[in-house]
Amino acid sequence: MADALRDLQVAESFLQDVRNGTSRVERNENPFTAIDEAGRIYDRDWTLAMKRIDKAEAQGVDVTQVRAQAYFVLGNLSLRAAERVSAVESVAGLNRNREPRFKDWMQQAIDSFTKSVRIRPSSEAWFNLGLAWIQAGNQQYAIQCFQQAEAADDEDISIIASKMIDRLQAA
């Protein structure tokens, strides 16, 4: 059991590295290197975190919370990477909805936030899933996600979700 708990600690530390890396991706002024960095973070730290989570689960530990957190963190990384791809495409005059890299990162963001809310629903995950749906061009799904965030216990997120719903319905 001690080994399994250690695996979860290591996984959580890797997830913190992914969060830190996501911040670097977001702040990176060069979208080309930001996209590359996002790929490395996914391939390295997020994948290693999931291996530790799977290892702990195989030893009988409840990993529900950490697994939901892992998908949430991946969703944030993917959403930021998609935004960076969009920045590259706007400079190049490309249509982001036809760009495969944008679609891949957006699909990964949507899938990750969806897994997170299925495992352990949270207002923040619902809200971010709504943001991902906006970026993907589906306002109806975004509104449904914001409604879930609006109904949650987090008052701050609930208010912001209400505003997003109003803005989308007014558009």
Image (cartoon, rainbow, N blue to C red):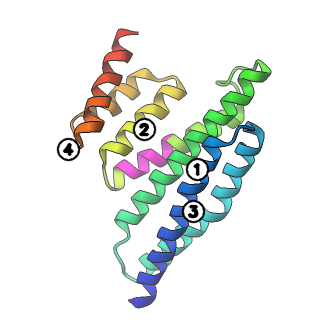
Q: Around disc 1, counting alpha carbons within 10 Å, would you say few (fewer than 14), some (14 to 19), or many (20 or more)?
A: many
Helix, strand or loop at mark 1 = helix
Indicate the quadrant containing the C terminus: top left, top right, bottom left or bottom right: top left
Toward the viewer: 107 or 39? 39
At label 2, counting other C-alpha atoms closer than 10 Å, the crowd grade (few under 14, some 14-19, many 20 or more) is: many
- Please give the count of numbered marks on the rendered protein: 4
Structural distance between the alpha carbons of marks 1 and 3: 8 Å
Q: Residue 129 appears at what percent x and percent y? A: 42, 38
Q: Which residues are magenta?
A: 110-117
Query: SS for tag 3?
Result: helix
Q: Which residue is identified by label 3? A: 17
Residue under label 2, please give it.
Answer: 129
Q: Evaluate if marks 1 and 3 touch, with contact meaning CB atoms under 8 Å apart.
A: no
Say which amino acid is labelled 2.
Answer: Leu
Residue at x-position 45% and y-position 88%? 3
* Foreground tag (3 vs 2): 3
Q: Earlier in the sequence, mark 3 or mark 4?
A: 3
Cα distance between the residues tagged 3 and 2: 22 Å
Q: Is residue 81 rendered to the left or right of residue 146?
A: right
Numbered disc 4: secondary structure:
loop
Q: Quadrant of the N terminus?
A: bottom left
Mark 3 vs 2, N-terminal side: 3
CA separation, marks 3 and 4?
28 Å
Q: Secondary structure at mark 2?
A: helix
Q: Residue at x 63, y 42 (%)?
A: 27
Q: Position of residue 72 (x, y in %)?
A: 45, 51
Numbered circle sitting on residue 22:
1
Q: Is 111 within the magenta?
A: yes
Kindly report which numbered mark, 2 or 4, lies closer to the viewer in this rendering. 4
The amino acid type, in three-letter code, at marker 1 is Thr
Three-letter code, disc 4: Asp
Q: Earlier in the sequence, mark 4 or mark 1?
A: 1
